[in-house]
Image (tube, grey):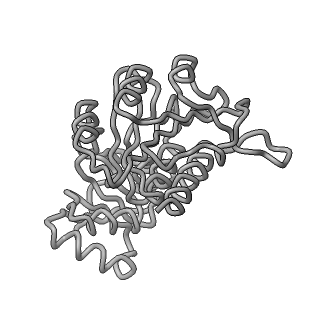
Amino acid sequence: MKPASSRRGPKTPDGLDQVYGVHALQSLMDRGESPRELWVQQGAGNRLKEVVAQAQARGARVKEQPRDMLDQLTQGAAHQGVVAFCPPLTPEGEESLWLKLSAWPSSTPPLLLILDGVTDVHNFGACLRSADAAGAHGVIVAKDKAAPLNATVRKVACGAAEVVPVYQVTNLARTLAKLKDAGVWITGTAGEAERSVFAIDMTGPTALVMGAEGKGMRRLTREACDNLAKLPMAGEVSSLNVSVAAGICLFEAVRQRQLAS
């Protein structure tokens, strides 16, 4: 491995995204994807020998960099001594969503997660991780006022960002209306709702809507929902982090479906 020049500040190669951390890189390669370039912390060769060898075997250019260079590049994130550069992830379009729903197998009702105004990349990544763990079939976001699919999302999601379909739509309220026309029941989460999420039937085609922290769902989104539900809060805290709430709601749907089957 040859040291890369550090005369200028660190910069992600044009057209590529960062994927940092050993687990994220290993997950990437386990799915058959190949990084174009790999920056490895100087002095960490033995610790990272196996994952570096895999990346090299896939054609990645490997360069050694001082730790402070990696720290600057990842803005202090826990990169674990390795940063990979890969083609960026891109959300699927709205038409892809309708095509998949039109051909959906009747034996497995769709379970979708909709994020309305979630702009924090850490929350987005954690929601993708929860969606993957629960076996959700996709995450729907709006083009505006939504977190991007960037390196931080990929890191937090721990591989889920690469496998969970993310559908980006122009008008979320209109998308909800079309989902209802397609037979999907829309349940929005709201603290002031009268019914608990545990009382909502989610054994059929279901989409769960999570609003932004603090603001919650937007008015048009709320009005487009079939049901509003809440998580019962027994303590002093009035609300949960959106990714935590999404995980609870998704796994309630999983629980109901397992009992129904």
Q: Residue at x 44, y 48 (%)?
A: 152
**The residue positioned farthest toward the right in the image shown:** 236
Q: Residue at x 31, y 79 (%)?
A: 49
Q: Identify the image quadrant of residue 59.
A: bottom left
Q: Is residue 148 left or right of residue 236?
A: left
Is residue 213 visible from the viewing direction of this image?
Answer: yes
Q: Is residue 138 left or right of residue 215?
A: left
Q: Position of residue 235 (x, y in %)?
A: 84, 48
Q: Position of residue 233 (x, y in %)?
A: 78, 45
Q: How many marks?
A: 0
Q: Looking at the image, is 239 positioned above or below residue 53?
A: above
Q: Position of residue 107 (x, y in %)?
A: 33, 55
**The residue positioned farthest toward the top in the image shown:** 220
Q: Residue at x 30, y 80 (%)?
A: 50
Q: Is residue 128 left or right of residue 84?
A: right
Is residue 7 visible from the viewing direction of this image?
Answer: no
Q: Is residue 237 left or right of residue 44?
A: right
Q: Looking at the image, is 154 positioned above or below residue 187?
A: below
Q: Looking at the image, is 172 positioned above or below residue 131?
A: above
Q: Position of residue 38 (x, y in %)?
A: 27, 61
**The residue positioned farthest toward the bottom in the image shown:** 46
Q: Judge by depth and name the residue closer to the eye, 68 or 27.
A: 27
Q: Quadrant of the N terminus?
A: bottom left
Q: Residue at x 50, y 54 (%)?
A: 130
